[in-house]
Image (tube, rainbow, N blue to C red):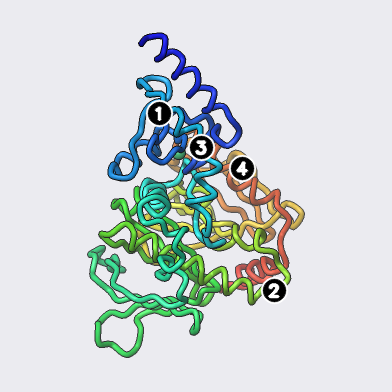
Amino acid sequence: MAVDQDQNRQRIKQLMRKPGNNYCADCRAADPEWASYTLGVFVCQSCSGLHRNIAQISKVKSVLLDPWRPSEVEFMDSVGNDAARAKFEKQVPAFYYRPSRTDCTLLREQWIRAKYERKEFIYVEKQEPYTAGYREGFLWKRGRDNGQYLNRKFILSEREGVLKYFNKNDAREPKAVMKFQSVNACFQPAKIGTAHGLQITYLKDNSTRNIFVYHEDGKEMVDWFNAIRAARFHYLQVAFPIASVSELLPKLTRNFIKEGYMEKTGPKHTEGFKKRWFTMDDRRLMYFKDPMDAYARGEVFVGSKDNNYSLVPHFPPGIQGNHWQFGITIVTPDRMFLMACENEKEHRDWINAIENVMDRPMLPHEYAVEAYFKHKP
Ligand SMILES: [Zn+2]
């Protein structure tokens, strides 16, 4: 018996090293050490925990710690990650978001459920919620000023090119109309304080607006997210007809480059430092009094080094007042922005985030954004 156990263990370990099996079948993390012996896939520890939530479909074991039967090893050998992907990911729409190891639990869990439990990518008719080009439903939306969540009707219409919501169910006019051109969506469970929390941002008169929504049902929320991605994809395909699919996909939705508190001064650098929540969204460095404010208090456009933007990792001499210890000076063609970080790690992370953006050459449409910021009253 012990000899058999040893043999089974050796065989399953060999399978684990086969190309295709050396990345988690669901989030692509390297060197997965768990396996679903009913689906025939190797997964990382974190995804194995999510497989336990669909125990009627997936049963998991540790490759290294659990005992294996010969028939289970046989089954793993006959399937494996490549074959499972060919089956369960046969028809994933190009725009559909595939989560990675660092994404929130909701995205990773719904990806696993969509693949194996609902089999959405085997039966295309199940993709209707995010492929139809039209979607309506109710979401809990955070009130702009009072922070209270109210149930609001949302409509996404590719024909009109907008996402909109209504304050009253019988209202004819929407409360807000968000054009797909500027809409972004990203899951922000920690910031919003709920596992299904989605932040939607859009531009209105070149200023950024934030709304915060969630739905109790994880599938509904992820369906909204992918419907927004589908709408963005179709919008971009029309706007940039010669761009390839792989060029467009990273533009569908974007996570913020960095977020967190820093202190800042006003334009004269004499008003003292105030603590603000900063969000680096591509080239827009926005600051808010509260992380969940509807509108940014202000924005700094971060151009490229070639266009006279630079960063100095400390303050200029002679800066007065109480402030956090670790200074950053952003120099734009117009003025200097002084920011203070609380600790060394934040200081280093912000410098990296801002310098990465500055190192990138500016794209044609970004000059228009820069021009707007220069002439802002
Ligand atoms: Zn994984």
Q: Residue flagged by tag 2: what amino acid is it?
A: Pro
Q: Earlier in the sequence, mark 2 or mark 3?
A: 3
Nearest-to-viewer mark from 1 and 2: 1
Nearest-to-viewer mark from 1 and 4: 1
Q: Is residue 29 left or right of residue 69?
A: right
* Pointers 1 and 3 in contact (C-beta within 8 Å): no
Q: Residue flagged by tag 3: what amino acid is it?
A: Gly
Q: CA distance from mark 1 to mark 3?
A: 14 Å
* Pointers 2 and 3 in contact (C-beta within 8 Å): no
Question: Can you say whether 229 is above or below 34 in the image?
Answer: below
Tell me the residue at 43%/41% (across/down): 322
- Number of numbered discs: 4
Of 75 and 90, the residue lying toward us:
75
Q: Residues within 10 Å of mark 2 (few under 14, many from 20)?
A: few
| Tag 1 residue | 71
| Tag 2 residue | 241
Q: Earlier in the sequence, mark 1 or mark 2?
A: 1
Q: CA distance from mark 4 to mark 3?
A: 59 Å
Q: Residue flagged by tag 4: what amino acid is it?
A: Pro
The x, y position of residue 247, in whole percent, is 67, 60
Q: Residue flagged by tag 1: what amino acid is it?
A: Ser
| Tag 3 residue | 80
Q: Quadrant of ligand 1?
A: top left
Q: Earlier in the sequence, mark 1 or mark 3?
A: 1
Tell me the residue at 29%/65% (across/down): 142
Q: Secondary structure at mark 2?
A: loop
Image disc number at residue 316: 4
Q: Is residue 214 left or right of residue 20?
A: left
The x, y position of residue 184, in whole percent, is 49, 64
